[in-house]
Image (cartoon, rainbow, N blue to C red):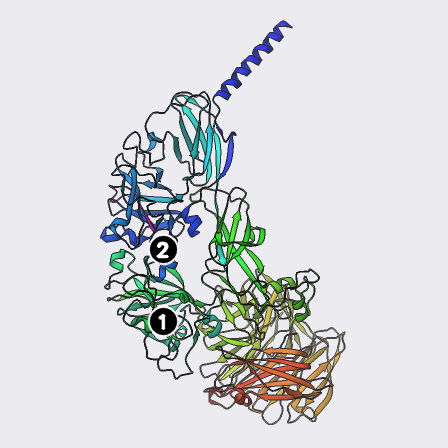
Amino acid sequence: MQFLVTSLLALALTAFATISTARAQTLSVNGATSATVGSAEDYASTVMGDPWDFDQLTDHVYMLEQLDGGESWEGIPAVSDGVLRATARSATPTLFVLFEGMPGAVNLLEKTGLRHPIDTRRFVRLSFRMRRSVAPRPGELVGAQYLTGIPRGATTWGVEQGPAAGDADSSSRIVNQSPLSQQTSPGWHIYEIDLDRRLAPPFSAGEPWNVTGIAHALNLDLGDGLAGATVEVDWVRLAERGRTVRLRWSSLGGAVTLTAQHAQTGDVIQIHPEHSSSVTFPDDSSYIWDYGYLPPGTWRVTAASGARQSNAVTIDIAAAPVVTVLDPDEAGGRDFAETLLSDGWELSNPQDLQHGRLWQIANAAFGASGMTGTSTDNNPAVILADDWGDPPGTELVIDADRFHRLSFTIEYDHKELGINDALTNTWGGIARVIWRERGSNGGIFTQTHAFIVYDAWPRTYTVDLKTLRAGNQSSYDSEICHEPPACEAKHPWGGQVTNFSIDPYEAEVPRWFRLANIRLAEDDQPNANGFFSVQWSVSPALFTSGQIAARPATVNLYYDTDTNPASGLVRFASAVEAGDGAFSWQAAGLSPGLYYVYVEVDDGVQSTGRYSTGPLRVVGGYPSVTDADGDGLSDAWEAAHDARAPAGDEDADGVNNLAEYRSGTDPRVPNRWIFSEGATGFFEERIAVANPGVAPAEFEVKFVPELGSPITRRYAIDGLSRTTIPVNEVAGLGETTLGAEISTITGAIVAERTMFAGPDRHGGHTAKAVAGARPQWFLAEGFGGYPFETFVLFANTGTQAADVTASYLLDGGAVLPHRFTLAPSSRRTVYANDLVIGGVPLGGRAFSLKVESTAPITVERAMYLSIGPFGNIAHASPAVEAPAASWFVAEGRTGPWFDTFLLFANPNDEATTATVRYLTPSGAIPQEYELDANSRRTVLVDDVPGLADTEVSAAITTDSNHPIIVERAMYWPQGAWTEAHNSFGVTSPATRWALAEGELGGPQAFNSFLLLANPGNEAASVEITILRSDGRPPISLPVQRVPANSRVTLAADQWRSHGLTEGERFGLRVFSTHPVVVERAMYWNGGGEILGGGTNETGIPLR
């Protein structure tokens, strides 16, 4: 027993001694074995919103690195995987990370020191990570140069440097942060300089860092003796001072060295001592370490004295969240060309240039990446609006008070030029914007000061032309009218502008350039309901390679009347998940004016914030936001749209009422429209889009070629207007068959597609878009034999493959099922004439079609007659999603010119009877037709007694247990057909309709007709609004009376007296006191023949 006690006592004493020894050599951070801390705020991340992490070319300024002919690099440095890599040409290469910009120059809105000056009292610690094939040497200097004044001058430059390895004397701070024994190795090293702590010459020279409190330019001196060496730079930081932790240890004794290793890269740095003088710490010492110059990640810290070494502690430096406000922004909202010209100025086709005019430019080419060309003198011009020779009143007019936010992308060749070379008259390195006010045709132009294109790879410039000022021409404070004389006579941006161009390259020798993506936009604005979608992105400022997980974060949202937080921020949203990236802000309650958005992001360790680069313009006049039932829908909106359930979906487009309210779309007009048919090349395809509402609309069109990748374009359209999209001119499509999907972003639109055959438009057809994809479709018409050629077009704009069964219903009841798979984002054309199903040829047979699919798709049918040139006789229709017990057809004409047919399809397993009331100007004529099960039937309306020569509409019904499909086709001239058109009926009359397509006059003498059928027993009073293009105001026509059980035909030619002009394309909005049916027919002299072309389509109901 005594032995056991003694043994236990000895064991306890041994354990105590072990624990005491361990405690004596324990290292702690902030009193613990680990700490999570925030990164020090870094200038590039915090102020510019883009850390110098070399994930893109614009993280350095190549042209300045070639300054004064002392080219730093062999060729252009490569930027990949977050590292800049280059071969030094100079023995003392420099890396410019910030260009100061040019006072008065428009590019102060780029990433320059003029736009983003460095607060030298706040950002003082410069650090960077570099690896060279030439190892650092004692006595070699690395460091920084900076510019504290504008313009450039010898007295405004300052220099702070230090030894690349070791230190110059025992009291100098070590710049290379690697342990002293490792500083001369050729691997990666982290360098740090406190720019505000001056050293003796030659380490410090010129102006002190904080002499003015502001610096505008910064470049790094990467060493000397480097000619031919490979240089890699991973990141650059310019950070605040004051991010510290307390490191405490005990019983190490002697001279203690503190080191840290980065878990992500393996980098080892020496925390202490900071220089080579000996330092002896007493027991229980501590050290306040300012770690702010280091990148994020996990740092493993140890303390050592001789052979003794402490345990390791970890410091997790959290990556600072960098927030970018994406919307509102300086690029603005709706674009002039997209809104009023139906074709953005991407410079993808020559039609982007009014009259196709270029000045002093050769070898012009247009494509998906913009326009390329060669300047031939020092004043070239890409002319976007050109009033030269246009009679007054016919010019393209830019409302410069509304559209003033300009952005464009430009690229030059000769990227090897230094700035002093590039800015000479000989080589050229500047661009200008030039304009002229309306009424000064042939008069003087206004021009901006130069855009200094300081690097030749693609750069995007953005400027608010409305803010440019005309200053003293002998100084640099002018932003326009840089070239005297008579500056005061020139016209600052505003009012009406009719001549607008970009001078892409001022050089006296031919120079290649690329210009693209020109936008002239208005301010961002809330939608018609007062909502604006504030959008942002949050990403961690990682700086270096390795996996560093971003921390979950939330954002708070504020608005401000300026960009000074001290003037007062007003919060409008709190603790929104940062990953949401968007918040629907109800701004209707604000007074009219400009408001900036401030987004503050907090990840639990640190927070930072950023203002939007542009404002939101609140114009007022929004509907009341009173919400008596608290369901998120305003009372006024519920009443206006008769949509009261937030989760309801009146238009069945998959978007609920609450989302429609917030996005400013119409809950009774679908947000998605799809065309299955389309073709360029031989065909000229155009898509007509009409906005029947009073609020502006924005939308995207995704073009889906049968072969190739989808192409998406964005458009905008003002309220009560329409526009035409020339599909053949969409860059990247070329000659192809295609489908298209239109997605409404805000507002309400309807769409139709017209295809003209051949350059003489000897035939054509029009079809309206269908409201989204469906798993089931029906077609009544089809014939697979001579003289008809029938094509069925299937489109899958979704992300899932669709297994399709197309069942062809023949006369007599036979059914032929055709099965195939339709890939995602694809289109397929089936030529029915050649189709053989189960050994049975479809050729020579009339048919209807029932389509079933495992995934939502869309279907159309196009038919051509093999008489004359291809497409001479053509019509097309989209399928309908379901049979119905009632159908209405507004258009129809019999007599010596037209043959009119009704096409019936009965997709049921039982026979049924269709009852038809033919509506004529003189009254109704009833008729009945027997329809066999799973079959189709064709009726020649001209043969119906009493209908031999008349305008005619039709109302068709069948019993509700046997719904059917109905189409109507018309061919002309009678007995010698040269053209045709076709459309489905509509399943119910309505009081509100819209049509997007229509044209009057022009070289081919277009005329359009509006057909109004009233199947009811009371007369209807109809209000018709003509929706026009190119910014022209809508036209309200006199109220039209449509008697009961009758139809009325109105010709667009009659509307000239109300303001419709020769050659205009237009849409229509039709409001009626009683339900009516609406169609439009359009005819032209195609192929040199009177009425050689014609199309028609039913209206699109709005309610």
Q: Which of the pair 657/457 is nearer the observer?
A: 657
Relative to 344, say whether 10 is above or below: above
- Left/right placement of residue 376 relative to residue 944 reads left
Q: Amino acid at mark 2?
A: Leu
Residue at screen point 62% across, 8% down: 4
Tell me the magenta residue range.
215-228
Q: Amino acid at mark 1?
A: Ser
Which one is in front in this view, the residue at disc 2 or the one at disc 1?
2
Mark 2 → mark 1, Cα distance in angstroms: 26 Å
The N terminus lies in which quarter of the figure? top right
The label shown at residue 51 is none
The residue wearing badge 1 is 501
The residue wearing badge 2 is 114
Q: Earlier in the sequence, mark 2 or mark 1?
A: 2
- Left/right placement of residue 436 relative to residue 617 reads left
Q: Which of the pair 472/1039 is nearer the observer?
A: 472
- Left/right placement of residue 431 relative to residue 1062 reads left
x, y percent for residue 1016? 72, 84
x, y percent for residue 38? 48, 40
Q: Which of the pair 422/568 is nearer the observer?
A: 568
Secondary structure at numbered mark 2: loop
Task: Report if residue 674 lies within the magenta region.
Answer: no
- Left/right placement of residue 420 relative to residue 100 reads left
Q: Which of the pair 437/219 is nearer the observer?
A: 437
Whether residue 1019 is visible to the viewer of this picture, yes or no, is yes
x, y percent for residue 927? 73, 87
